Image (cartoon, rainbow, N blue to C red):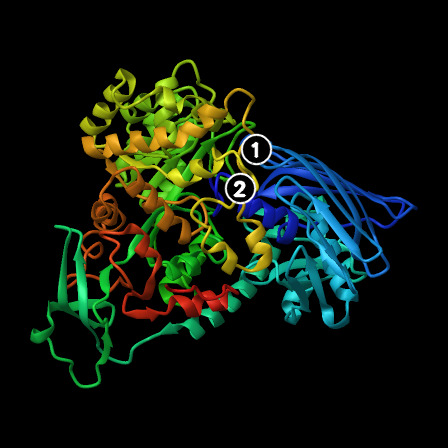
Amino acid sequence: MMRSMPPRLAPLAASLLAAAAAAPAALAAAGSARQDEIVILGNVSGEQKLSTGSDGVTHAEYSFNDRGRGDHIVATWKLDAAGVLTEFDARGNDYMKAPVTETFRLAAGKASWSNRSEHGSAAVTGEAFYVPVNAPPEIFGVLARALLKAPGQRLALLPAGEATLEKVELSAEDAAHARGPHGPMMLYAVSGLDFSPSLIWLESDGATAAQVAGWFSVLPAALHAQLPELEALQTRWNAAWSARQARETTHVPAGDVLIRNARLFDPRDLTVTPGTSVLVRGAHIVRVAADADVAAGPGAEVIDAHGRFLMPGLWDNHQHFGDHTGALDLVNGVTSARDMANDTDEFLERVARFDAGTELGPRVWKSGIIDGTGPYAGPTKMRIDTAAQAIADVDWYADHGYGQIKIYSSVPPPIVPVIAAEAHARGLRVSGHVPAFMSAEQFVAAGADEIQHLNFIVLDFLYPAVQETRNMNRFTAVAAHARDFPPDKPPARDFIAYLVRHHTVLDPTVNIFEAQFCGDPAALTPGLEAVAPRMPPQVRRGLLSGALVVPKGEEAAYREALPAMLTLLKAMHDAGVTIIPGTDSMPGYELHHELALYARAGIPPAEVLRMATLTSALVVGANGERGVIAPGKLADLILVDGDPSVHIGDIDRIDLVMKGGRIYDPSSIEASLGITPAERH
C-alpha cells in the first residue's frame, strides 16, 4: 500500500495515472510495432506493446506487476482526422485484478461509453476526446497529439471537462539533454486531467517519446539511461509551478498575530475553553490566555475567531507524498504527516521545499521502506536478500534524517529482528506490514513498534492457515473472515492484550477497507460524497470506489467486514492500544473521513481529535513542539467553524490553517487546484 497512493490504486491514482495523465509511451508508425518498459521507482515492472496496421487500427497490450497487483489491458482503437477516438475497446483486469471491459463509440454526432463504473452517452458537436478509465498509457500520447491539432490546443473531454496543451520552453542546456533515439524531444504540459498540468514528452513528429514520473514511468528501453535526467528536468518544472502556487496562497505576517475570541481545544484534557486568545510570534506561540489578559502589540495582525473552534493542526500518519499531496493536506488542516515509503531522491527535495515554504505542504516525518526481493517486491530500490544489505539500508535511512523504518511484505522473516535491532540502535522506530509467512504476534516479538493497516490484525487471527499475504489474500481473506473474530473471541481478545503489553501502536487506515469491501465499483469512495462534485471533472471520475469483486456466496461476509473491523478497532482503543490515524488514500479529505469512522466505531469525538493531534506527536517524539496549543510550541493550528469535539463531521469546516506562523486560506488553495468552493449551511 504505497505510492502517494491508496492501496485501491485503481480508483484515484491508477485511473488518472494509466488512463488520463500517467504514463504514455511511443506509438509506432502505421504498419510497425513498438515496445516500452514500465518502470516503477527505477525497477522495470512491466511493458507496453503497440502496433498500428494499415487499416489505422492501433493494437496495444499493457501490463505491469506491482506487488502482485497491476493492470493487464489489451485494447484497440481508431481515430478520426482530428486525432480523437472514434472507437475504443479494452479487455483485461484493473490494478486490483477486477475484470475490465470498456467500450467507446463516436458516430453521427453521438458518443456512448461503458466501463466497470460508468455507462453513458452524449451528443457531440465539434471534436471531443473520450478519456478511458482503463487504457494503455499510450492513450495520453493520443490525446496530446489531438491537442496539437486542435484549434488553440483545446479540446472538450468526455464524459466531462476540457483539456489544453502548451509547450514547455526548455533552456538550451535542458534541451541538449532532451534527445531521444530519434532526435530532439519536446516537453508539453496538458491541463484539465488533474489538479495541475500533466507532462508528456513528444518527438519532433508528434510521436510519444515518454512520460516520466518518480513512481511510474513508461518509455522505450533506449531511453532508460536518461530517466534520471528527465526526472530532474520535470522536477524543476513542477517545483516552479508549486512555488508560484505557494506564493499566491500563503500569507506571511509582517509581525505578531493575535487570534482572539476563540474556543480553544486542549487535547491533554479534552477541554474546550471559550474567550481565549493566542499570540503568535514568528513560527511559535508565545502566549495563551483569556481575551482580557492579552493585548495586541504595535503592528500585530488581529484575527477575530468569532467564537470558532481553535485546535492544534492535524496529523496524517500514513501518506506517500507526490504532486498535490501537500497542498491537499493544508486545505484540510493537516500540518504534520508521516510519509510511509517513497523514493529516496525527489522525495527529500520535496520535503525541503515544504520546509522552505516554496511548496505547499505539512511538516513531514520520514519513514523509509525496506522490502525483500521477488515477484511481490514493493516499489522501492531498498530491496534486500541478506542481513548485511538490510543493515546497510537502515543505516542509509538513519544517515539521511529518517525517524522510522517500514518493513514490507517480502522481507524474509529471519531478517526482521536484524532490521529492528539496527533501527533501534540508530534511534529509529520500526513498523510495517507484517511480512508474509509470519504472524503479527511474531512481528511484534521480533521488534516491531507499530503495525500498519488494520487488516494485518485480522490476518493474525487467520495465521497459520493464511500465510501468503503478499498477494490479494491480504484483502480478500480479511473481507471473507473479519466477521468471524469478534473482540470477545479468544484469538482477538488474547492478541489485543498482547499488543497492550508490548505498547504496540496501530495505524489502521480503515477508510481503504471501507472502499474495497463496499461491493459497488460505481459508488463514490466513502467519505468523498460531499467533496467529489467540487473536484475537476477528470479527477472526479477517479473518486469512484473501485471496490473488490465480491465472490459469489460471500456477499454477506463482505458487507459485514467493515462493521466487524470497526468493532475490533473500538475494542483495541478501549483496551489501551495506541491508535494514530492515517489515510493511505486521498490526502486531507479522507483523513477527515478516517476520523469519522473512528467516531462511528464508538470512540468519542474528542478522543478522536486527541489521536489526530497530541497522540500522533507523542508516538514519534514530536510532542515537545507539536500536538497542543501552548507557549513555546510551533504555531501549527486550525480554526474550525463548528465543534468537532462533539460532532466530528465539523472537522470538514476549516476556515484557517496556520503552520509555523504562515497563514493559509483553504478555499484559496482549493481554487488554485481547480476545486470549486464548498457550500456552507
Q: CA distance from mark 2 to mark 1?
A: 9 Å
* Residue in the picture at 66% in, 43% down: 134
User: Which residue in the protein does label 1 denote?
Assistant: 69
Q: Amino acid at mark 1?
A: Arg
Identify the residue at the far front of this view.
681
Q: Earlier in the sequence, mark 2 or mark 1?
A: 2
Instruction: Please give left or right for residue 511 compared with residue 568 in the image.
Output: right
Image: 248 above or below 35: below
Any part of residue 400 in sight: no
Identify the residue at the far top of this view.
465
Q: Residues within 10 Å of mark 1 (few under 14, many from 20)?
A: many
Any part of residue 476 in sight: yes
Instruction: Please give left or right for residue 550 compared with residue 129 in the image.
Output: left
> Quick one: SS at disc 2?
loop
Q: Which mark is residue 138?
A: none
Q: Nearer the viewer, residue 648 or 468?
A: 648
Identify the residue at the far left of this view.
293
Q: Which mark is residue 9?
A: 2
Q: Nearer the viewer, residue 185 or 670?
A: 670
Q: Name the spot of residue 676 as percent of width and height, x first.
A: 49, 65
**Dot 2 and dot 1 residues touching (CB under 8 Å):** yes
Image: 172 above or below 477: below
Q: Name the spot of residue 673 as percent of width and height, x first.
A: 50, 64
